[in-house]
Amino acid sequence: MISPGFVADALACMREQGIAAAPLLAEAGLAGVPTEPVTSAQYGQLWHAMARAAQDEFFGLGARPMRPGSFTLLCHAVLHAGTLERALRRALRFLRVVLDDPSGALELREGLAEIVLTDRGTPRSAFAYRTYWLILMGLACWLVGRRIPLRRIDFSCPAPEHRADYHQFFGAPVHFSQPQSRLAFDARYLALPTIRSEPALRQFLRGAPANILVRYRHDQGLSARLHAQLRALPPADWPGFDSLAVQMRLSPATLRRRLRAEGQSFAAIRDEIRSGLAQEMLRGTTRSVADIAGALGFSEPSAFHRAFRKWTGQSPGAFRDAAPA
């Protein structure tokens, strides 16, 4: 679901260009400006309507319009890149050509891959940077067939008022009024293979942009089945890899090989679920860190502390203190 604040942000872009909101909302099947979250499909329809009305797939947020059709060309440009790193570098070059500003670059620093955005003028709105990262990372996650967990998001602009949805959307620590706008994730993901084909791209484009809003947490492959099986159980009750292979009527070697072909591994799926659950419990409950560690299947709170710092770059306590009220 997409928060009503992001709908309001999008409509504000249109108002600045003299484009009325009512017809756009009607195209998206919305009776008026929503006060409750909307579906990804509705927001995707609104995205299409705005792009057509403004003749700009970046909604007037860049130094130059991103003309309709640019996203499709971007997808074709990166489809056969081979690895996530090459795909991201190609995508960033493409976006620099069509937008001028913001301009993105991939930097490697202390085990992190950072997408750093710069502008020749004053910082843009948080919505502009969010839209850039949504386009880039939504496509990247689809290319490798899995969600890429984020470690940190920095915005060079001030924080929008009363907008906890920015923190919730990214699932990572978010900081405003920083020297640069940057998005960071573990550099090891850069080696993931791109696994998509031309037919898969045609199907992807039919569902875009609604499908990039969820950053492709999982597709419909074997990793999705494994993800669903683990999500259905408390982490403390998760079976081992060999037992899961038996349940899926595969040998452990076959399961491991097929997961690798999807750019996945059992350990990565397990860590992704644990990380998401840990962040939900730290933000949304008053349970102690030790209690959360036990619920996630860690034998010792110290092991949970080490894992959580690896996932987010913060301790559980610091993450909880930074969460919006």
Image (spheres, grey):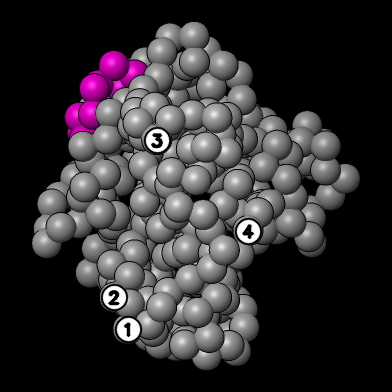
Q: Which mark is residue 69?
A: none
Q: Looking at the figure, which quarter contains the C terminus?
A: bottom right
Closer-to-camera residue (136/298): 298
Q: Is residue 83 magenta?
A: yes
Which secondary structure, mark 1? helix
Q: Position of residue 3 (x, y in %)?
A: 67, 58
Q: Position of residue 86 (x, y in %)?
A: 20, 29
Q: Is residue 253 left or right of residue 189?
A: right
Pointer 1 or 4: first along the chain: 4
Is there CB contact under 8 Å for labels 2 and 3? no
Q: Which residue is mark 3?
A: 252
Q: Is residue 186 magenta?
A: no
Q: Is residue 24 above or below residue 129?
A: above
Pointer 3 or 4: first along the chain: 4
Density class for disc 1 (Cα within 10 Å; few <14, some 14-19, many ≥20) is few
Density class for disc 2 (Cα within 10 Å; few <14, some 14-19, many ≥20) is some
Q: Which mark is residue 306?
A: 2
Pointer 1 or 3: first along the chain: 3
Front disc: 2 or 3:
3
Density class for disc 4 (Cα within 10 Å; few <14, some 14-19, many ≥20) is few
Q: Amino acid at mark 1?
A: Ser
Front disc: 3 or 4:
3
Which secondary structure, mark 2? helix
Q: Amino acid at mark 2?
A: Arg
Q: Residue at x 60, y 89 (%)?
A: 286
Q: Which residue is mark 4?
A: 233
Residue 73 in sight here: no
- Range of the magenta residues? 77-89
Pointer 2 or 3: first along the chain: 3
